[in-house]
Amino acid sequence: MAKNSAFSVAFALVLTAACGKASGPAASPPAAPEPPPAAPLPQAASPTAALPVAATPAAANMAKPVELSAKSAHFAATWHFAAPKVGELFAVDIALTDLAGQPLAAPKVAIDATMPAHGHGMMTDPELRQTAPTKWHADGLKLHMHGSWQFDVRVEAAGVKERLSAAYEEPPEAADGL
Ligand SMILES: [Cu+2]
């Protein structure tokens, strides 16, 4: 028994070290619903500071547009965002259709991103607002590590709840400046 718990602690430490590497000090709680006041990344401390607002033409060029799409049993979704750097807040625009491609009005939509291989999600809670009956805008997403992420869009319409998932690779640091 003592052996097992020692192993668990060691394992948790390895996980913490692996996932804390890119985000600075590993002291911040991984399940914090909101960014802690002492954010590990200074430039992400406030949402306004994290927005580049095309400060330089180079920065604007770096944000490549990304389009992901996925289907479930009844729904289809496409979501767009500008390829974020690690630790940088970004926004996502979501458009919903049925499987025939007809715009779908959904009263409830949620979006999340996780790293399935690491067993963790984001350290921020996205805020969604409906911009049209079939369109949603999500703010406050942040991918705090390089590697394989999965976006999950949850749609609830006409009493049906389904999850639509798509993979996204957060590229290594060397690719960020290209
Ligand atoms: Cu991770």
Image: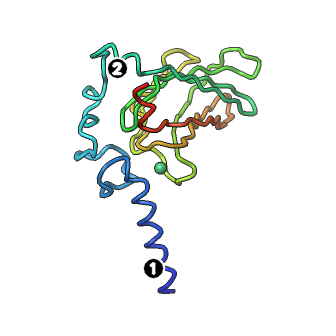
In the rendered view, how is the structure colored? Answer: rainbow
Residue occupied by mark 1: 6
Q: How many marks?
A: 2
Residue type, numbered disc 1: Ala
> Mark 1: few, some, or many residues within 10 Å (few <14, many ≥20)?
few
Compared across the picture, whether 127 is left or right of 109 comes to left
Is 35 rendered above or below residue 103?
below
Asked whether 100 or 17 is in front, the reply is 17
Residue appearing at x 52%, y 44% in the figure: 114
* Camera-nearest label, 1 or 2: 2
Badge 1 or badge 2: first in the primary sequence: 1
Residue 18 percent coordinates (x, y): 43, 56
Residue 162 percent coordinates (x, y): 67, 37
Circle 2 — which element? helix
The part of the image, by quadrant, that contains residue 103 is top right
Residue appearing at x 36%, y 38% in the figure: 87
Circle 1 — which element? helix
For the residues labelled 1 and 2, the Cα–Cα distance comes to 46 Å
Q: Is mark 2 within 8 Å of ligand 1?
A: no
Residue appearing at x 49%, y 76% in the figure: 7
Q: Tell me, yes or no, whether the two marked residues, 1 and 2, touch with CB atoms within 8 Å.
A: no
Residue 173 percent coordinates (x, y): 41, 37
Asked whether 132 or 62 is in front, the reply is 62
Residue type, numbered disc 2: Ala
Residue occupied by mark 2: 59
Residue 171 percent coordinates (x, y): 49, 36
> Mark 2: few, some, or many residues within 10 Å (few <14, many ≥20)?
few
